Amino acid sequence: MAKPGEELYRVMVRQRILSTPGMAEKTYTYAVSYIAPGQPPVTLFIPEKEWSEKREKELILKDIEERKKIRPEIVRR
């Protein structure tokens, strides 16, 4: 568990991108690239209709917890 004032993650880029180019009805998605201590950078894609600052934070924190469970594959000779 994080200590008060400890950095949980840092959003590097948040970009609204067109998801349906060339379609009559345009839909957008947010691409949110973040980095958390001890983990490589990752990008989450959130449909614009679902995006809010609160929802983004929930998804990032959930993603961090899921990624902590992943164990690297070790390949030996």
Image: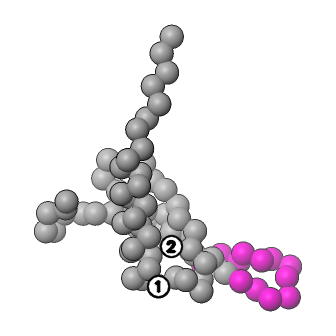
User: Is residue 30 toward the left or the right of residue 74 in the image?
Assistant: right
Span highlighted in magenta in the image: 15-27
Q: Residues within 10 Å of mark 1 (few under 14, many from 20)?
A: few
Q: Residue at x 44, y 76 (%)?
A: 56
Q: Residue at x 71, y 77 (%)?
A: 18
Label 1 amino acid? Ser
Q: Nearer the viewer, residue 73 or 12?
A: 73
Q: Secondary structure at mark 1?
A: loop
User: Is residue 46 toward the left or the right of residue 73 in the image?
Assistant: right
Q: Secondary structure at mark 2?
A: strand
Q: Earlier in the sequence, mark 2 or mark 1?
A: 2
Magenta stretch: helix, strand or loop mostly: loop
Q: Is residue 53 above or below residue 68?
A: below
Mark carried by residue 64: none
Q: Can you identify the residue that label 1 sits on?
A: 52
Q: Nearer the viewer, residue 12 or 2?
A: 2
Mark carried by residue 14: 2
Magenta span includes 66: no
Most distant residue in the bottom direction: 25
User: Is residue 50 toward the left or the right of residue 12 in the image?
Assistant: right
Disc 2 to disc 1, how far (Cα)?
12 Å
Q: Residue at x 56, y 74 (%)?
A: 46
Most distant residue in the left direction: 4
Q: Residues within 10 Å of mark 2 (few under 14, many from 20)?
A: some
- Residue 71: where, in percent of width, then height? 40, 38
Quadrant in which the N terminus is drawn? bottom left
Closer mark to the observer between disc 2 and disc 1: 1
- Residue 64: where, in percent of width, then height? 38, 58
Magenta span includes 21: yes
- Residue 5: where, in percent of width, then height? 16, 68
User: Is residue 21 toward the left or the right of residue 5 in the image?
Assistant: right
Label 2 amino acid? Arg
